[in-house]
Image: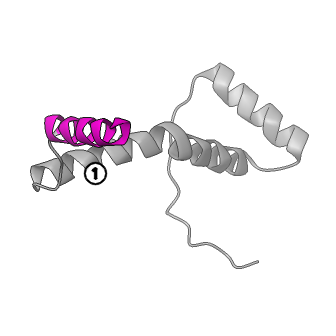
């Protein structure tokens, strides 16, 4: 397995109950706290974090004129549906 490039160490303060859960999970899994943190961050980034990044990209796309007008899209869908019904 290839080693991944790691950042410099970071520090953070956590609520005691969260740290306690992290330490218990690490102990049960026989892993480090860092391992638990990385897995938790990956899960966050795959869900809520991904949504935040996607929305930010969508805003940049709109600012750059790359979006579609919703009324035009709805009109196109309506036209397609009318043609399909005929």
Quadrant holding the N terminus? bottom right
Front residue (pair 79, 58) = 79
| Farthest-out residue, front | 86
Residue placed at 73% from the left, 26% from the top?
Answer: 20
**Label 1: which residue?**
57
Position in image of residue 86 (x %, y %): 32, 38
Packing grade of label 1 (10 A; few <14, some 14-19, many >=20) is few
Tell me which segment is drawn in magenta.
Answer: 70-86
* Location of residue 27 with respect to 57 vertically, above or below: above
State the scheme by which the image is colored.
Answer: one colour
Residue 72 magenta: yes
Residue 85 magenta: yes
Front residue (pair 60, 80) = 80
Front residue (pair 55, 84) = 84
Position in image of residue 9 (x %, y %): 53, 57
Within the image, what quadrant is residue 19 found in? Answer: top right
């Amino acid at each position: 397995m290839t080693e991944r490039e790691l950042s410099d160490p970071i520090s953070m303060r956590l609520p005691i109950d969260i740290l306690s859960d992290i330490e218990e999970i690490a102990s049960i899994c026989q892993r480090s706290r860092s391992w638990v943190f990385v897995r938790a961050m990956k899960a966050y980034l795959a869900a809520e974090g991904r949504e935040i990044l996607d929305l930010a990209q969508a805003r940049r796309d709109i600012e750059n004129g790359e979006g579609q007008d919703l009324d035009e899209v709805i009109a196109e869908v309506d036209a397609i549906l009318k043609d399909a019904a005929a």
